[in-house]
């Protein structure tokens, strides 16, 4: 976190009662840790479908509820006491293709269930909904602005956008205080490569660290905007605490377009294993986005946020974390 700029602002979370749905997941657990360091009173709600309490091992001071955001009894009974709710619980893109009904029920039904429960809350200061730049599909122009056309190419993108729309509708119709953040290819600490649903960075790190050839789907020229986890967490926290974010939607990325080939080259350089030759294999069903990079000017202007980690620094930190923890990985 860029403490010399934003720490004083984020200390306003101190002693606030906060719920993080999906708080045992990759992004959620990192968010929980930062909130606890800021002195917040944090409750994690997670069904542990893809999340794991191992992500929070050694973290003290949080409350845990094993539960599902679809639970129409648990959610209304639970959420009314919280001042801030970070909604990260979701089925991810790989699961969505395997089971679109599960994707629909969690990402849309679970979000609507949460919104209904929060609608009459007297304590809520802000609901922060985590969305994805997957909703842009193959964009017409780069970089992608928040108000650019939406192109839904898979069930996950469809359900996340539906969740966004419900969130905004509750803001417009019921004055529910909300902010939406759209994450772009977040990577970093606690993105376990042993998790079958982890992203490309984690998978490549595990391969290269073992001296194995990384496998690239397609020709490797496809691009993404890779965002280091600490940057994503800071942007999310600022979006939550700042009043001027109310009702707004923000891209959270770096504004830097990176090819998968270049990403792999940087990792090979970090590990000093340039002798490994890349292996190109067939594309997957989810590999239907050719280029992606987001415009982060809106969040920079409105929230005074900008990323602190370039790709190499973020990857070096991620490699350092992996090498330190891989012996205990499950």
Image (cartoon, helix red, strand yellow):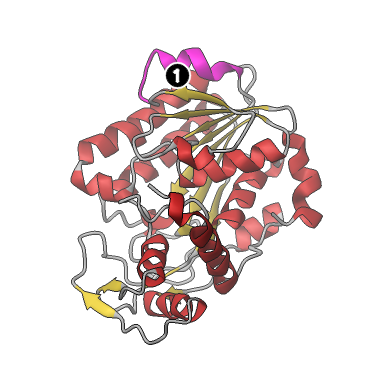
Q: Quadrant of residue 101?
A: top left
Extreme front residue here?
A: 327
Q: Which image quarter is the N terminus in?
A: bottom right
* Secondary element type, mark 1: helix
Residue at (51% x, 27% y) in the render: 173
In the rendered structure, the answer to whether residue 233 lies left or right of residue 221 reads right
Query: Taking 308 as reference, is 113 above or below it?
Result: above
Residue 28 percent location from the top left of the image: 51, 41
Residue at (25% x, 59% y) in the render: 286
Residue 21 percent location from the top left of the image: 48, 32
Task: Tell which of 176 and 211 is nearer to you.
Answer: 211
Residue at (60% x, 55% y) in the render: 230
* Residue count near mark 1 (Cα–Cα under 10 Å), binned few <14, some 14–19, many ≥20: many
Residue 25 in magenta stretch? no
Report which residue position mark 1 lands on. 75
Query: Taking 184 as reference, is 245 above or below it?
Result: above
Q: Taking the image as drawn, is residue 129 in sight?
A: no
Q: Quadrant of residue 95?
A: top left
| Residue segment shown in magenta | 70-81
């Amino acid at each position: 976190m860029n403490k010399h700029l934003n720490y004083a602002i984020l200390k306003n979370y101190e002693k606030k009662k906060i719920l993080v749905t999906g708080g045992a997941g990759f992004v959620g657990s990192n968010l929980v840790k930062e909130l606890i360091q800021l002195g917040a009173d944090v409750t994690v709600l997670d069904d542990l479908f893809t999340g794991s309490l191992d992500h929070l091992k050694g973290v003290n001071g949080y409350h845990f509820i094993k539960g599902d955001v679809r639970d129409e009894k648990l959610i209304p009974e639970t959420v009314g006491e919280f001042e801030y709710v970070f909604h990260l619980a979701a089925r991810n893109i790989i699961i969505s293709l395997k089971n679109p009904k599960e994707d629909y029920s969690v990402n849309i039904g679970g979000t609507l269930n949460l919104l209904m429960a929060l609608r009459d809350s007297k304590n809520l200061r802000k609901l922060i909904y985590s969305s994805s730049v997957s909703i842009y599909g193959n964009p017409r122009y780069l970089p992608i602005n928040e108000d650019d056309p939406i192109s839904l190419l898979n069930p996950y993108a469809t359900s996340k956008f539906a969740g966004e729309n419900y969130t905004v509708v509750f803001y417009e119709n019921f004055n529910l205080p909300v902010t939406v953040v759209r994450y772009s290819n977040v990577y970093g600490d606690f993105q376990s490569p042993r998790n079958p649903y982890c992203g490309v960075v984690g998978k490549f790190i595990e391969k290269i660290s073992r001296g194995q050839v990384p496998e690239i789907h397609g020709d490797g020229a496809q691009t993404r905007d890779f965002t280091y986890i600490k940057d994503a967490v800071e942007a999310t926290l600022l979006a939550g605490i700042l009043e001027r974010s109310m009702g707004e939607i923000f891209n959270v990325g770096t504004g830097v377009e990176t090819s998968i080939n270049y990403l792999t080259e940087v990792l090979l350089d970090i590990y000093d294993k340039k002798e490994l030759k890349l292996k190109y294999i067939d594309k997957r069903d989810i590999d239907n986005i050719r280029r992606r990079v987001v415009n982060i000017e809106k969040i920079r202007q409105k929230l005074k946020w900008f990323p602190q980690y370039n790709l190499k620094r973020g990857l070096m930190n991620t490699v350092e974390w992996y090498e330190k923890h891989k012996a205990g990985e499950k």
